[in-house]
Image (cartoon, rainbow, N blue to C red):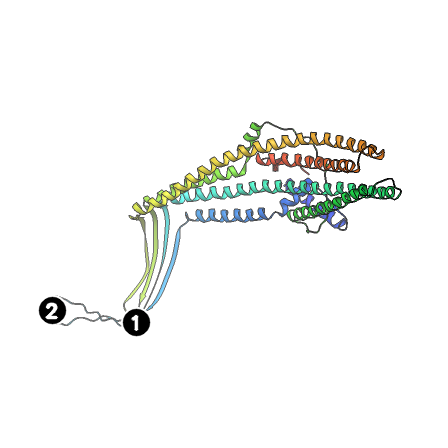
């Protein structure tokens, strides 16, 4: 109940932000992004419908334990039959005639209560229950996927926005440099060729900004659609707590958690149990079915018969002899499904191990990239400072200055992307271990 209230309050807070800041950029934290994506996920809505369908199938299987009740009534118009009763007591061809009714009415009610049906009912219910639980596990697995996609979309938006910001800053510096170079060229202090080189780089930066802004718009539309927001909403990623240091466990620890918590593994285990129950249910065709039967019959044929209160009851036994050869194919089909599920489980186990090892190495690589890129930014900054001083003193060419500027811009972009990738790879590792949803901070 507390979780529901917390989620509702989060949704109201986000809606309030949207209404009060409709004309401004909408700040959005990673946790708010996840909450919105969970609330508006189309996949989770599909999963909910699948669970409802599986629950209905379970109820249908359980209904097989209930009595079968039927009522039948008919009104018939009859032709005039010729009925001649022969007798041995007299000679000749004479006979006795009886009434010739032109209509008949009858009705009956029957009740059949199953007692034993080769355990088909029991195992049918068992199979349906496992499939219903498997549908719920599928929804749990897809919930992890929704959270993972939300994190990826948020990180992509952050990287795109940072790239636009850095390129704009660099473009402003480049345009200022063009202005300075233009004055120097007019005063004969700079070769026109160097001015043209600088202007060409400015044009390249402008093109880079166009591409960066295009990527930002697409990233924003993508996140808006995932979060159920209007696609034209302008989002501003709030990275508060984005760079918290995470405590990394061992690969074995994550693998153990995966085998305990992965919902897709839980779902395939449940489906395996469902197929085992299906095999036992199919074998039930080899056995007879037994049930209590009862009925009531009433009939009326004018001038001939009136029957009321004809009540019957007893035990009925039914055995289909053809099941001896027909049920074999049914059993083999169920057994083949069981073997298929078992093979799929083995393959999933391998994929889980591989996925965790890859995610683990990706996270370590992301951490290392941050260290490398931080040094690169420091070195590129110092290199640009030295190169600019030398250029101001005519010790290096304009080309070297422009190259140093490009290297500094790229180093800054790479650093921000590495920081976002670290967040993404850590959450991917949690998702592969099946603990991503449970490790999200509570609002």
Question: Residue 195, percent across and down?
Answer: 81, 43
Question: Residue 58, percent across and down?
Answer: 47, 46
> Label 1: which residue?
102
Up-down: is 362 above or below 12? above
Residue 325 visible within the image:
yes
Residue 5 visible within the image:
no
Asked whether the residues under the numbered discs 1 and 2 touch, taking CB atoms below 8 Å apart as contact, a structural biologist would say no
> Label 2: which residue?
90
Q: Please name the residue shown 37% across and 60% down the image.
A: 72
| Corner quadrant of residue 101 | bottom left
- Given residues 148 and 56, the one toward you in this image is 148
> Which residue in the rendered view is the most extreme toward the right?
187
What is the crowding at mark 2: few (fewer than 14 residues within 10 Å), some, or many (at least 20)?
few
- Given residues 134 and 350, the one toward you in this image is 350
**Quadrant of the snapshot with the C terminus:** top right
Q: Nearer the viewer, mark 1 or mark 2?
A: 1
Along the horizontal axis of the image, is 193 left or right of 262? right
Q: Please name the residue shown 21% across and 69% down the image.
A: 83
Question: Residue 150, percent across and down?
Answer: 64, 42
Along the horizontal axis of the image, is 166 left or right of 185? left
| Corner quadrant of residue 32 | top right
Question: Residue 381, percent across and down?
Answer: 77, 32
């Amino acid at each position: 109940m507390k979780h529901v209230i917390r989620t509702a309050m989060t949704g109201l807070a986000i809606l309030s932000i949207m209404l009060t800041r409709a004309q401004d950029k909408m700040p959005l934290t990673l946790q708010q992004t996840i909450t919105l994506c969970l609330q508006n996920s189309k996949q989770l809505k599909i999963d909910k419908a699948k669970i409802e369908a599986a629950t209905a199938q379970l109820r249908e299987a359980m209904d097989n334990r209930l009595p079968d009740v039927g009522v039948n009534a008919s009104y018939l118009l009859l032709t005039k039959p010729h009925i001649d009763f022969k007798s041995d007591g007299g000679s000749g061809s004479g006979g006795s005639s009886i009434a010739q009714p032109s209509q008949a009415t009858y009705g009956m009610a029957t009740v059949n209560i199953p007692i034993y049906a080769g355990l088909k009912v029991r195992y049918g219910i068992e199979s349906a229950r496992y499939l219903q639980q498997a549908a719920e596990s599928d929804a749990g697995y897809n919930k992890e996927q929704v959270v993972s996609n939300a994190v990826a979309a948020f990180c992509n938006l952050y990287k795109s926005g940072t790239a636009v910001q850095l390129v704009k800053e660099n473009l402003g510096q480049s345009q200022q440099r063009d202005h300075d170079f233009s004055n120097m060229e007019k005063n004969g202090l700079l070769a026109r060729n160097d001015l043209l080189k600088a202007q060409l780089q400015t044009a390249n930066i402008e093109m880079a900004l166009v591409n960066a802004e295009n990527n930002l718009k697409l990233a924003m539309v993508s996140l808006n659609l995932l979060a159920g927001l209007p696609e034209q909403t302008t989002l501003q990623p709030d990275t508060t707590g984005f760079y918290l240091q995470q405590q990394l466990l061992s690969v074995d620890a994550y693998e153990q958690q995966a085998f305990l918590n992965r919902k897709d593994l839980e779902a395939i285990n449940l489906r395996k149990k469902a197929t085992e129950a299906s095999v036992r249910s199919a074998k039930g065709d080899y056995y007879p079915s037994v049930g209590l039967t009862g009925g009531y019959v009433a009939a009326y044929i004018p001038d001939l018969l009136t029957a009321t209160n004809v009540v019957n009851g007893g035990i009925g036994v039914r055995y289909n002899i053809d099941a001896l050869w027909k049920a074999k194919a049914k059993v083999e089909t169920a057994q083949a499904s069981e073997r298929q599920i078992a093979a799929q489980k083995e393959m999933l186990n391998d994929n889980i191990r591989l996925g965790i090892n890859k995610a683990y190495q990706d996270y370590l690589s992301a951490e290392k990239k941050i260290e490398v890129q931080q040094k690169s930014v420091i070195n590129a900054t110092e290199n640009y400072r030295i190169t600019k001083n030398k250029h101001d003193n005519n010790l290096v060419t304009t080309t070297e200055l422009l190259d140093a500027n490009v290297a500094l811009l790229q180093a800054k972009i790479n650093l921000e992307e590495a920081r976002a990738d670290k967040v993404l790879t850590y959450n991917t590792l949690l998702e592969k271990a099946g603990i991503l949803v449970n490790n999200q901070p509570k609002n």
